[in-house]
Amino acid sequence: MSNDWVDVCIQEPLDAGELLSRLDDASVQGAWEDQGMVHLYWPEDQWSEDRLALLRLVVSDLAPSCGDVAVSVKQIPSQDWNEAWARSVQPLRIGRLVIRPSWEMITLDPDDIEIVLDPKQAFGTGHHATTRMLLMWLQQDIRGGEMVLDVGAGSAILAMAAVKLGAASAIGVEIDPAAVDCAREYVAQNGLNDQIDIVCGTLADLSQERRASADLVLANLDRQTVLNLADDLAGLAMQGARLVVSGILVEQQIEIIDHLSSLGLVCSERCEEEGWVAMKFLKPESCDGEG
């Protein structure tokens, strides 16, 4: 498989989050705004003329008054893409959580919790709305001592945040070996090896005992993956775990709510940002006292 990347530059100051939301393309591995332009990154082997055509349609819809917006496409080696992405990542504050690359120093307030993350890939840095919503919720919902199961862990930022906020331990499950390697480096970089285990595989690869021990299940995935895993996720919630789902477009939420409701769960809370929605699910008798 090629390790090279395709850098697609849209020469119009569009909102990168809204552009990603409209594209709804899980193969996009990075998006950032730079001097009035937006850069999107695809692995070279997942780029196609069909994706370019769809991108042009979405761009024209977002900027109808601008006529034909210039879109350029170029191939870049993996190391150059990593360097370009790293340059775009600045310290990010989400509530009490401060996420920063190691080369960017920042003054912390007494209650701040710091996560050091040197981006090698563009997933899970906290900049995407789907991740931000869950990071805010974790600050409200971690009570202390939980075992957290992070399904589709990516960079493990959610698992790390949960533990730093007081969870006793976390298991991150991730199918992408490149993401697993990065996540394990991040966990070690933040001194959390004793509390976080990153597993390369699927939810089915975890033993029933490890799955059943979860108090909080995080599923920042996509519509189809949530539907594929719905039986397992609902099973964990029916055993008493709190289930939090993100990575869902606003227009997809009814389908997800209806499907998980058919499996016995209720949606107790939802949050919307930049065209994305996050939702909390519980078994019905667990709703009392939940905000």
Image: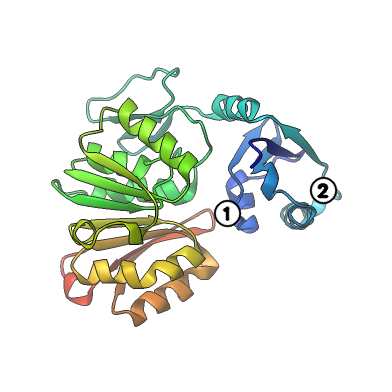
* Residue on which disc 2 sits: 66
Q: Which mark is residue 60?
A: none
Q: Decide if residue 166 is on the left or right side of residue 34.
A: left
Near mark 1 (Cα within 10 A), the count class, few <14, some 14-19 or many ≥20, is few
Residue at the spot x=50%, y=42% of the render? 123
Task: Give coordinates of residue 248: x percent, y percent.
Answer: 48, 62
Q: Secondary structure at mark 2?
A: helix
Q: Decide if residue 285 is on the left or right side of residue 78.
A: left
Residue at the spot x=61%, y=37% of the render? 32
Q: Decide if residue 273 is on the left or right side of residue 54.
A: left
Task: Give coordinates of residue 28: x percent, y percent.
Answer: 61, 47
Relative to residue 19, is residue 12 depicted above or below?
Answer: above
Closest to the camera, between mark 2 and mark 1, is: 1
Q: Quadrant of residue 82?
A: top right
Residue at the spot x=79%, y=56% of the render? 53
Which label's residue is closer to the chain start, 2 or 1?
1
Q: Nearer the viewer, residue 57 or 259?
A: 259
Q: Which mark is residue 26?
A: 1
Cα separation between marks 2 and 1: 27 Å
Relative to residue 255, is residue 270 depicted above or below?
Answer: above
